[in-house]
Amino acid sequence: MSDATESGPTEASSDVRGAAADAGTAEARTGAAAVDDPILRVEGLHKSFGGITAVDGASFAIDRGVLTGLIGPNGAGKSTTFNLITGFHQPDDGSVYLDGDDITGHRPHEIANRGLVRTFQIARELSEMSVLENMMLAPQRQAGEALWRSVTPGVRGDVRADEAELLDRVWEMLESFDIDHLAEEHAGNLSGGQRKLLELARALMTDPDILLLDEPFAGVNPSLEDRLLDHVHDLRAQGYTFLLVEHDIDLIMNNCERVIVLHQGKILADGTPADIRADERVIDAYLGGDV
Amino acid sequence: MSGASGSDASAGTTIREALDNDAVLVLGLLLAIYVGFYLLGATLGFQSNGIANSLRRVTFLTAVYAMVVLALNLQWGYTGLFNIGVAGFMAVGVYTMAMATAAPDARVPGLGLPLWVGVVLGMLAAALVGLIAALPALRLRADYLAITTIAFSEIIRFTYLSSTFQSFTVAGTQLGTGGGSGIGIAHTPDDVVIALLIENPIGAVLYAPIENLLTGWGIVPNVVRGWVYAVALLVGVLAFYWLLSRIAHSPFGRVLKAIREDEDVAQALGKDTRAFKIKAFMVGCALMGLVGILWQGSLGFVNPNSFLPQVTFFIWIALIIGGAGSNTGSVLGGALFAGLLFEGPRYVANVVDQSFQLGSAPSTIAGGVGPLFAGDPIPLVAYTLANIAPLRLVLVGVVLIVLMHRRPEGLLGHRKETAASIDLGRPTRDGSASAGADSIPVGDRDTGGEGR
């Protein structure tokens, strides 16, 4: 469980360890920062593809209502970690807990239905579907998703009522994201940034508790990036939990309350942006130095 | 409807508007095909009975192709499930029906059940075989399903062909597939449907004058009765269309569409995509089983050679012509394929043969190509016409290649039909939403999480 020794006995690590010790958590996890109320907990996650180890015993926990960033150089295992948490890959070893329940090895839709919803690195809008259809798809447990109810005369009225109710929410959401003017447009015709907005709005339609955003700012122009960030901060203020994978370190450092650094499949550092900034191992990892 | 109001421009737009109307589009195409076959028949010197019969046959083929293409459209057009075993599922439907309804003392003994029970059993069996084929393959990527389905289709055909199952005993009951010699249909759906429609007091009263009128024109009663079945099948097309449009315009259909576009996204949004795919696949297979019954069952006799893989490819070509993803396109594709590619060439070949007196055709292609170098193309043309049935396949292939180059989306595949049970326009009562721009409305967050 405690891979704390993995993080190496360099001087700078004492910062991070110190933080954990301050909080007085008895079972200090992998030199992780103090977490009082974890909504998501990952323990000893391990995954290899053929001979390549992508994630090598990563353990961390995400505090409820906190905006956490996950960074790391290319190939550090960020996306694989995401896929392991969200059920798109099965871990070789280790566990994932959501709200204390073990969700390791559950299928992606089960995990999404439990309130952990992800977005994708390359925006995966459903391009042949309109923005409205994209949004209408997302809400869970729709009455009309049962085939018989959608087809049988008599009960279809319920389906339509259900849809009308959803439609109100969809339009409100589109308005709040300022993409209501694109509603009838096919998602494939949207710009890269608009697609990212759509993906976030669509994920919100599922009523998630925690959102895992995989590089939500990649390929987004600066003004849209600001808008996306505003939305993320708004939502965090409303009590949503976020885990953000991002390449842009400055962006993470300036916006996240907590940062986890992944390197070669292991947790290299975990703490406040200030802790991370001061951590020499992180700098080494990014500059390709020896760790 | 009243369109002829003056200028060319307005007439043009009226026509264009009319073409946007699906009913006009389909009926117009059917009418054009009828006119074409009427002219071909007249050129060949057919009497009214012959023409009526050729139109009946075109109607019949159009209807069965339209229905089976609609079923395939649910699987491929909406859900992206690559089923190239259509013939096999049709075979399961009609064979199950035949075995259930055959008399216990017939040459190939059966259970002696009434037709409707046979139809239900046939559809259930086709759905069940679909489930068995899909279960292992749906966990994998699309192409594996294609390989599995075509393999299943051939396994099914060879099973029915096998002499092992020619007749066998299950729990003391004699059953059989008839093996290579096929199995007779005890109650053919056409006889049953025709009897149902015209052998009741109301039907008989309505039907009598129609038959009198048509026999007066020299059309034999059998052909008139055949028309009754063909029209009943067209009603069947409407029923298929209704069902599949309802599926398409529903939250269920929306998930299918999302699976076609990107299954991972559908999963990430909490949809159990495997369950949706299996449901869509089974419904499609059950409908294919039904079409197998209505089509092959009405011929009075089935044998395994009616279910060669080329049958599946014909159906696929009809779907591609019409445009995958569009139900109206599926009907158009079925009509175009049945009329122009399947029946048409035979008639055209006869007309050419009759009008030009080409003489006897050479027996080999070499005999046709040889004289070509001597500047005499007649033997090659004669050879082509004499072998028009197999050469239809070549024509179909050429059409497919041209289509893939020129219009890969088919006639109506470009259409975007919204997958929802209601109009997705902006709700009229506005105002409150834009006022609360500082908070993001997420509905009932507290009640929304009963899943944990």
Image (spheres, coloured by chain):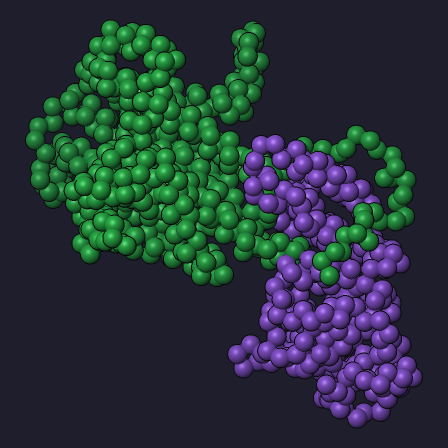
Chain colours: A purple, B green
Give x and y (percent) for residue A63: 83, 70
Q: Provide residue A110's location: percent of width, then percent of height.
A: 65, 60
Q: How many marks?
A: 0
- Residue B314 position by quadrant: top left
Nearer-the-camera pick, B216 or A261: B216
Residue occupying image coordinates x 71% and y 63%: A214
Q: Is residue B100 visible?
A: yes
Q: Quadrant of residue A48?
A: bottom right
In this view, B27 is above or below A40:
above
Q: Quadrant of residue A39?
A: bottom right
Image-based side of B72 in relation to B4, left or right: left
Give the residue furthest to the front: B172
Location of the C terminus of chain A (image quadrant): bottom right
Q: Is residue B315 visible?
A: no
Choose between B17 and B429: the one closer to the eye: B429
- Residue located at (84% from left, 49% from top): B440
Q: Position of residue A76 (x, y in %)?
A: 68, 76
Q: Residue at x 41, y 51 (%)?
A: B128
Quadrant in which the N terminus of chain A is drawn: bottom right
In the image: residue B282, left or right of residue A54: left
Q: Position of residue B421 (x, y in %)?
A: 63, 35
- Measured along the vertical axis of the image, is residue B213 above or below residue B363? above
> Does B229 sit above or below residue B166?
above
Taking B1 as reference, is A8 left or right? right
Taking B85 as reference, is A11 left or right?
right
Query: What residue is shown at x 71% (from left), y 79% (from top)?
Result: A43
Q: Nearer the viewer, residue B30 or B140?
A: B140
